Image: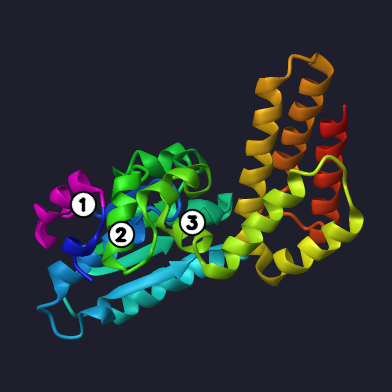
């Protein structure tokens, strides 16, 4: 992959093209919504700059961060990259992908390296929410912001990847895609299209029917973590419709309470039983519809 194959992000690509390995700042933050192409752009940039070097992939170290990433993981990848790069006198790149998951101790460990970077080492932090980073880290890094992709960008992506998705379908599902290639690929997967239609049909009913909920959950549970955002966004979209079309203050309060509950409990870090949390949300949703 090279920079010519990236859709959107023209300003970011032109900026990166004008950089050389010699004038790269030692620490970077690539930030923007998950799935818009931050990591792909970085990989393409490194391919363009390093592909004339023998075994250049040996100079790239990546840590995929998640909820279990610890301070020891941070220290280990930095230590290993330093040992591997000893006496090479070449640029080494350490990439922290999905760094939103890093905890306070991990950021402190990373800050020490950013403040005193090893020779010829470039640290690149990729995340969604810049507010999750300590200001001391942000102040020492160069920032590169990635905006949401437009529907035209996404249509170009579909054409390049031979996906049978037109602009009308993109417009119809815009509230779910939200400018993200990752979301696009999930939403227009053939099996997921069926699940989305089942979910919308279920929510368009006037009453909660437990057997239909059981049937719906059997489909959702096949890849619940990946489909969680679809559930969240469709519930939010439906609640928004009710809120806008209704002036009843009691009903509006119930809607806001449910949205608050979802924000606090319905996320990737939740340890609650998945079926139970979804049951609570739908019971409250149909309670609001019945009001």
Q: Position of residue 210 (x, y in %)?
A: 90, 55
Could you tell whether 214 is left or right of 204 in the image? right
| Number of residues whose C-alpha sits closer than 10 Å to that of mark 1, classed few (under 14), some (14–19) or many (20 or more) | some
Residue 94 quadrant: bottom left
Magenta region: which residues?
A: 8-25
Could you tell whether 243 is left or right of 87 in the image? right
The kind of secondary structure element at disc 2 is helix
Name the N-terminal-most of marks 2 and 1.
1
Q: Position of residue 59 (x, y in %)?
A: 26, 76
The residue identified by callout 1 is 25
Q: How is the image coloured?
A: rainbow
The kind of secondary structure element at disc 1 is loop
Mark number, residue 157: 2
Q: Is residue 11 magenta?
A: yes
In terms of depth relative to the viewer, which is nearer, 68 or 6? Answer: 6
Separation of residues labelled 3 and 1 (CA atoms): 32 Å
Using the image, determine if residue 124 lies above or below residue 140: below
- Residue that appears at 49% across and 38% down: 131
Separation of residues labelled 2 and 1 (CA atoms): 31 Å
Q: Is residue 159 magenta?
A: no
Name the N-terminal-most of marks 3 and 1.
1
- Residue that appears at 74% across and 14% down: 247
Marks 2 and 3 close (CB-CB < 8 Å)? no
Separation of residues labelled 2 and 3 (CA atoms): 13 Å
Residue 5 quadrant: bottom left
> Residue 67, can we see it?
no
The kind of secondary structure element at disc 3 is helix
The residue identified by callout 3 is 183
Q: Position of residue 237 (x, y in %)?
A: 63, 37
- Residue that appears at 87% across and 44% down: 283
Name the N-terminal-most of marks 2 and 3.
2
Q: Position of residue 76 (x, y in %)?
A: 47, 73
């Amino acid at each position: 992959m090279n920079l010519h194959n990236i859709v959107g992000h023209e300003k970011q690509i032109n900026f990166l093209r004008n950089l050389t390995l010699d004038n790269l700042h030692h620490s970077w933050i690539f930030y923007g919504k998950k799935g818009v192409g931050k990591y792909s752009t970085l990989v393409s940039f490194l391919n363009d700059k390093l592909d004339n070097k023998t075994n250049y992939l040996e100079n790239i170290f990546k840590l995929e961060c998640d909820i279990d990433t610890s301070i020891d993981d941070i220290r280990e990848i930095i230590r290993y990259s330093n040992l591997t790069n000893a006496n090479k006198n070449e640029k080494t790149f350490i990439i922290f992908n999905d760094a939103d998951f890093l905890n306070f101790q991990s950021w402190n460990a990373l800050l020490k390296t950013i403040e005193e970077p090893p020779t010829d080492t470039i640290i690149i932090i990729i995340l969604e929410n810049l507010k999750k980073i300590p200001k001391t880290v942000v102040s020492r890094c160069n920032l590169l912001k990635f905006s949401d992709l437009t529907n035209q960008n996404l249509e170009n992506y579909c054409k390049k990847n031979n996906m049978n998705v037109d602009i009308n379908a993109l417009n119809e599902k815009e509230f779910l895609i939200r400018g993200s290639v990752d979301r696009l690929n999930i939403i227009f997967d053939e099996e997921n299209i069926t699940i989305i239609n089942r979910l919308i049909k279920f929510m368009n009913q006037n009453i909660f029917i437990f057997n239909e909920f059981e049937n719906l959950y059997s489909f959702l549970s096949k890849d619940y973590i990946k489909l969680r955002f679809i559930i969240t966004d469709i519930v939010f979209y439906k609640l928004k419709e009710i809120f806008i079309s209704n002036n009843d203050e009691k009903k509006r309060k119930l809607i806001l309470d449910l949205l608050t509950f979802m924000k606090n409990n319905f996320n990737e870090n939740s340890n609650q039983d998945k079926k139970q949390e979804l049951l609570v949300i739908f019971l409250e949703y149909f309670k609001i519809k019945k009001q």
